[in-house]
Amino acid sequence: MRSTEYTDQQEQIARIAKAMGHPARMRILNFLAAQDSCFFGDINEVLPIAKATVSQHLKELKDAGLIQGEIEGPKVRYCINRENWELASRLFRSFFKELKEKPTCCE
C-alpha cells in the first residue's frame, strides 16, 4: 500500500476523531448521551458560546455521523446516532487493540 492510500477504517477513524477533537463537541456529545434527545436551544444554554458556533459544532458532529437531527416545526431536535456511535466504539477499540498488541520501536 502506498502511503497516500488509506483504508476505509483509517478514514472513518480520522473523520470521527476530527469531529471529537474539540472540547465543545465533547461536551455536546456528553450532554446528548445523557438525554433521549434535545433541541438546539437546550444545547445552546449548556455551552457558553455563540449560537452560530454551536451550530457549526453540531454540523461537524452530524457530518461525522455521531449525532442526528430532525426538524420539528421551527426547531431542530438532536440525539446521538446510536448505530454510528457503536460503529465508532468498535473502530476505536480495534485500532487501540491492534496498536497495543504490536511491539514499539522504543522497547
Image (cartoon, rainbow, N blue to C red):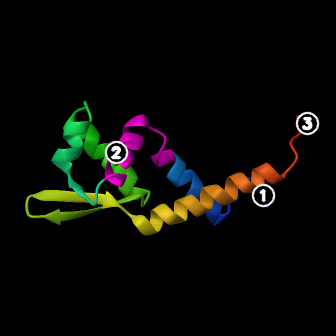
Label 3 Cα neighbours within 10 Å, binned few <14 / some 14-19 / many ≥20: few
Q: Which residue is mark 1?
A: 2
Using the rendered image of the protein, determine whether residue 91 is visible from the camera's viewpoint: yes
* Pair 3/1: label in front: 3
> Measured along the vertical axis of the image, is residue 47 above or below residue 9?
above
Q: Report the side of 42 relative to 31 (left or right).
A: left
Secondary structure beneath disc 3?
loop
Q: Amino acid at mark 1?
A: Arg
Chain-order first, disc 2 or disc 1: 1
Q: Quadrant of the N terminus?
A: bottom right
Q: Quadrant of residue 93?
A: bottom right
Q: Which residue is mark 2?
A: 28
Return the residue found at the far top.
Answer: 48
Query: What residue is rendered at 12% in x and 57% in y?
Result: 75
Q: Which residue is mark 3?
A: 107
Q: Report the side of 97 relative to 55 (left or right).
A: right
